[in-house]
Image (tube, rainbow, N blue to C red):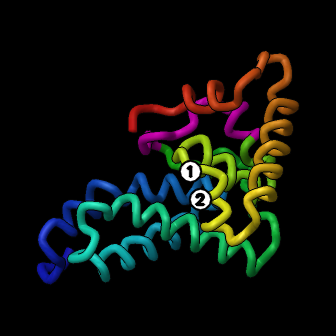
Amino acid sequence: MSSSLPDGAEEFIKAHLEALRRYAFVLTGNMADADDLAQIAIVKVWERWDELSEYAYAYAKRVIATRNVSRWRRTRRELLTADSDSRPSRDLGKEIRDPQMWQALQELDQFDRMVVVLHVLDGYTFGEIAEIARRPQGTVSSRYSRAVAKLRERLEGRRVVDIDQVLVPQLGPS
């Protein structure tokens, strides 16, 4: 790292870059796009470091989420990765460890996957997700409901009652 980085920025990057990459990968399903989004987020944090250093991680995740929505809107195509070999090989924090859950998430379309990840893993409300995605809150909540129904269907036989209880326990320590 360059010595011109503001105080604490280098430590932030070392501590959070891999987690940001993993977060972006869960949203996009594509490691190349995840790398791009994580790097954009790091640059945006660096540009505003003096203003938001104590909120840098939350800001970086928001940058990733909003940039992903923008990218999704531009392309309007599915960017799924069915090959689990493209997943990061080491534990990057909240990695989803259940292969069936991972596959079921990857089979959702990108917008539905984003809504589930933002709501279940990050605790965003439907209103917050609607603001990020620039969609009506009703659209976000109905897409979430449909996505959860698809996950339940794909995980049939596992007695999935509450997707939060199935998805969240698959995560390691934050």
Residue 160 % position (x, y):
76, 22
Q: Which residue is mark 1?
A: 124
- Callout 1 crowding tier (Cα within 10 Å): few <14, some 14–19, many ≥20: some
Residue 130 % position (x, y):
67, 62
**Quarter of the image containing the N terminus?**
bottom left
Q: Is residue 94 above or below residue 39?
A: above
Describe the element under mark 2 as helix, strand or loop.
helix
Q: Residue at x 78, y 16 (%)?
A: 159
Residue 80 lies within the magenta run: no
Residue range corresponding to the magenta coloring:
90-104
Residue 100 lies within the magenta run: yes
Q: CA distance from mark 1 to mark 2?
A: 6 Å
Residue 99 % position (x, y):
67, 32
Q: Which residue is mark 2?
A: 128
Return the residue nearer the eye: 28 or 120.
Answer: 120
Residue 22 % position (x, y):
50, 53
Magenta span main SS: loop
Q: Residue at x 45, y 32 (%)?
A: 172
